[in-house]
Image (cartoon, helix red, strand yellow):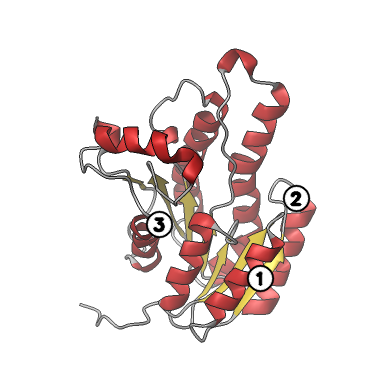
Amino acid sequence: MPRLNDTPLGGKAVLITGGAKRLGRAFALGLANAGADVAITYLQSGREAQSTVIDVSGFGVRAVALRCDVRDEKSVKAMVKEAVRELGGIDILINNAAIYESVQFDKMTVAQWDNMFATNARGTFLVSREALRSLRQRKGRIINLGSLGGLRPWATHAHYCSSKAAVNMLTKVMAKALAPEISVNCVAPGMIDLGQKSAAQFLKRMKSKTPMQRNGTADDVTAAVMFYATAPPFITGQVLAVDGGLELA
C-alpha cells in the first residue's frame, strides 16, 4: 500500500477551467491544499480569479489565472500553451467551465441550445484535445464535471441536460481513446448548496427529496474530484454521482 501523506499532489500541475468561483474555486483550493500547483481559467470573472489565485498561493504553491473562452478554439490553444509554460506541464485537467439555465422547452431558442453545447460539451472536448500532449507525457488524468442533469431528465433544462449527457458519453469515449496513458472520469454533482439566496426555496424542497436528507456542499464535490485525482489510474471511464442518492428518489 502507498504511504499516505498530507500533500498527495505535491509536484503535480493542475489546470481547472472555470476556476474563479463556486465549485471551480473550491477545487483549486482543495488541490492546492494537497500540494498541487494550479492554473485556473476565467472568462468574465477576472476579479474573482485574482482573489482565488491569491488564496491558492497561500498554500505555498504556484498559482496563475488565465483568461479563456472554452467555446473558442484559438482561445483554448493560447490558454493551454500558457498554462504549460507557467506550470511546466499538466498532470491533471479538470473540465469545470460550464453554464446553466432554466428554459421552457417551447420557449428555447437555437442560440440558447447552441451556446449551452458550445460551452459544456465542445469546451470540454477542445480543452482536453489541446492538453493531450502534456497529459500523455506525464501519464495524466482528466476529470470532467457532469451533472445529475446528465443522468436524469429535467423538463425545463432540455439543453443543459442534453449537454451534460454528452459530457458523460464523451468521458467514456475519451477513456477508451486515450488509454493507457491517460485516465478519464466524470464527477456528476446533484443539488449543491453554495449559499445562493435565490435558490434557497428550491434547495429546501430538494433536500426533502434527497435520501441523505441534505443538499451537497462544495466539500462533497471536491472530495470526489480529489478521489479521481489520486485514485489508481486503472479506474477510468466512470461517472460518479455526488447527489446524496437523489438519482434514486
Instruction: Classify residue 185 as left or right of residue 77.
Output: left
Can residue 163 be seen in this snapshot?
A: yes
Can residue 89 be seen in this snapshot?
A: no
In front here: 104 or 172?
Answer: 104
Disc 3 marks which residue?
218
Q: Position of residue 175 (x, y in %)?
A: 45, 50
In front here: 142 or 69?
Answer: 69
For disc 1, the neighbor class at 10 Å (few under 14, some 14 to 19, many from 20) is some
Q: Position of residue 33 (x, y in %)?
A: 42, 77
Q: Position of residue 103 (x, y in %)?
A: 58, 24
For disc 3, the neighbor class at 10 Å (few under 14, some 14 to 19, many from 20) is some
Q: Amino acid at mark 3?
A: Ala
Q: Secondary structure at mark 2?
A: helix
Q: Earlier in the sequence, mark 2 or mark 1?
A: 1
Q: Nearer the viewer, mark 2 or mark 1?
A: 1
Disc 1 marks which residue?
50
Disc 2 marks which residue?
73
User: Looking at the rendering, in which quadrant would you find the N terminus?
Assistant: bottom left
| Separation of residues labelled 3 and 2 (CA atoms) | 30 Å
